[in-house]
């Protein structure tokens, strides 16, 4: 069954598939709703989308989170006889082991023999040559629902390549582990970068499919050609030469009140749900002189610096898989440990981008002129040049939050138009 979803004011029409049947259960026993129903990601609903790709030449954007039960989507579809011409990989690579920001090259996947093309670095979208022998494009990546997590930027680039090259696009949805609230400053377009391409808040409360609908529906794609092609596919949906233009496979039994525990770490430095919950708040320390916990067993759950008082919590970051080169390796840092059980960490976050830790860290740091890195990295993460100045000026957390409200409320209004699932309020 195919449903057509209409959204005002621009009447974007997207084809949405509803559930036909589910595949085998995931290995994790924690992926259930409060009433005991198992949350089923879009990729597991193979019987829904297999007829759409059988006999087609397929390109897939995937990584280590693209799982169908215990098996990667690439391996699953290959065994089913799907002709996968090419795999595209995001930041951290197709197998998800590269450091943040590390350059990942192209290679042939040893397991399947399929060419893998990196879309992180100087090349961020498929070229026309990459897609010349492709009939349909698929996107399946687990997001964490935070603006500066680069997979949504990769999603936009992939969408634009599909529209510009007149390729049907199939997006397999996955639950958002931070999808139960919306908070943080909305990005100022002046600070657009790969860690923030659109005017959305730090935590935007959308799944990847909802986010894709938002940026297409609001005409936020960066190229006029992509927007025109998107418009063409919208109006020519029943064209005989293509069955659809932009199709999403929804999650089953998911809504925005769900607390979804990821069965696979989404990237090397987000090892568990505690890091997922804290990441919107503590990733801001990447734009400071402090260690954000990379090179420890709890990245984004601890932060500190050698110059803090020695009676604070201490840790020593060092090289490990996925964090081979970062700040303050081998130096004893003093600071804060926010780790705990998932329930304890969730309570600390309290459905907010917490600023109290950043404010306190700045207040106690002896060399305030050197606290923020000079490369403008903090402003790119914050999405503006206001937050840094507010911290320096000693603004309270409440005062800072009040400054977010106008843009945040407007985003919340727009967001509602693109929800595929029941909301948290």
Image (spheres, rainbow, N blue to C red):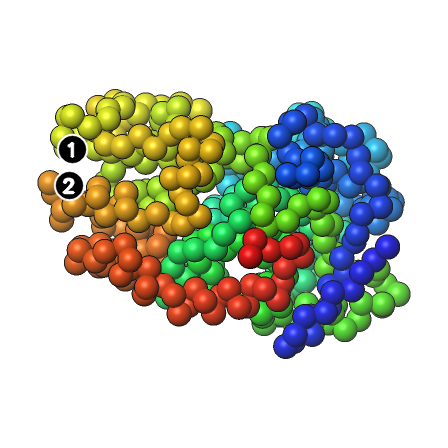
Q: Dots 2 and 1: beta carbons under 8 Å?
A: yes
Name the residue located 41 percent from the left edge and 35 percent from the top edge: 345
Residue 107 relative to residue 326: left or right: right
> Which one is nearer the viewer's eye here, 202 or 319?
202
Q: Which residue is identified by label 1?
A: 308
Secondary structure, mark 1, is loop
Mark nearer the N terminus (2 vs 1):
1
Name the residue located 38 percent from the left edge and 65 percent from the top edge: 405
- Structural crowding at the residue carrying mark 2, measured as other residues with C-alpha within 10 Å and reported as few (<14), some (14–19) or many (≥20): few
> Which one is nearer the viewer's eye here, 269 or 93?
269
Q: Is residue 316 above or below residue 37?
A: above
Secondary structure, mark 2, is helix
Distance from the alpha carbon under mark 2 to that under mark 1: 7 Å
Quadrant in the picture for the N terminus? bottom right
Quadrant in which residue 340 is drawn: top left
Name the residue located 76 percent from the left edge and 57 percent from the top edge: 16
Taking the view exactly as shown, the residue that stands out farthest to the left is 366
- Structural crowding at the residue carrying mark 1, measured as other residues with C-alpha within 10 Å and reported as few (<14), some (14–19) or many (≥20): some
Q: Which residue is identified by label 2?
A: 364
Q: Position of residue 114 (x, y in %)?
A: 70, 34
Quadrant in the picture for the C terminus? bottom right
Quadrant in which residue 288 is drawn: top left
Q: Position of residue 4 (x, y in %)?
A: 78, 64
* Residue 307 appears in the picture as rendered: yes
Q: Position of residue 371 (x, y in %)?
A: 19, 45
Taking the view exactly as shown, the residue that stands out farthest to the bottom is 9
Taking the view exactly as shown, the residue that stands out farthest to the front is 35
Q: Position of residue 171 (x, y in %)?
A: 69, 50
């Amino acid at each position: 069954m195919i449903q057509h979803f209409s959204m005002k004011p621009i009447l974007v029409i997207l084809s949405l598939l509803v559930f036909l049947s589910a595949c085998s259960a995931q290995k994790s026993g924690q992926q259930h709703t409060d009433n005991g129903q198992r949350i089923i990601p879009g990729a597991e609903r193979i019987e829904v989308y297999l007829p759409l790709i059988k006999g087609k030449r397929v390109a897939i954007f995937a990584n280590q989170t693209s799982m169908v039960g215990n098996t990667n989507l690439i391996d699953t579809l290959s065994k089913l006889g799907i002709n996968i011409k090419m795999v595209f990989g995001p930041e951290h690579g197709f197998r998800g082991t590269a450091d943040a920001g590390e350059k990942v090259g192209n290679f042939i996947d040893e397991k399947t023999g399929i060419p893998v093309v990196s879309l992180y670095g100087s090349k961020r979208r498929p070229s026309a040559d990459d897609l010349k022998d492709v009939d349909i494009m698929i996107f399946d990546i687990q997001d964490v629902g935070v603006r500066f997590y680069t997979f949504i930027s990769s999603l936009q680039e992939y969408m634009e390549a599909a529209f510009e090259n007149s390729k049907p696009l199939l997006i397999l949805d996955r639950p958002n582990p931070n999808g139960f609230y919306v908070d943080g400053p909305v990005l100022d377009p002046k600070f657009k970068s790969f860690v923030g391409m659109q005017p959305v808040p730090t935590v935007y409360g959308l799944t990847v499919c909802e986010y894709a609908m938002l940026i297409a529906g609001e005409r936020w794609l960066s190229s006029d050609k992509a927007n025109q092609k998107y418009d063409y596919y919208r109006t020519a949906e029943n064209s005989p030469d293509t069955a659809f233009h932009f199709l999403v496979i929804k999650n089953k039994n998911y809504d925005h009140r769900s607390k979804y525990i990821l069965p696979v770490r989404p990237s090397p430095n987000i090892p568990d749900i505690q890091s997922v919950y804290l990441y919107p708040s503590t990733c801001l320390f990447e734009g400071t002189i402090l260690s954000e916990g990379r090179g420890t067993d709890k990245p984004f759950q601890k932060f500190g610096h050698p110059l803090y008082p020695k009676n604070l919590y201490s840790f020593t970051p060092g090289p490990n898989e996925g964090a081979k080169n970062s700040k303050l390796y081998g130096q004893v840092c003093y600071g804060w440990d926010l780790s705990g059980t998932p329930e304890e960490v969730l309570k600390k976050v309290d459905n907010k981008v917490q600023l109290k830790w950043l404010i306190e860290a700045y207040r106690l740091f002896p060399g305030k002129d050197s606290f923020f890195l000079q490369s403008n990295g903090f402003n790119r993460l914050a999405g503006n040049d206001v937050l840094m100045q507010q911290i320096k000026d000693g603004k309270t957390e409440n005062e800072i939050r009040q400054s977010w409200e106008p843009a945040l409320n407007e985003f919340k209004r727009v967001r509602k138009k693109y929800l595929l699932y029941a909301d948290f309020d």
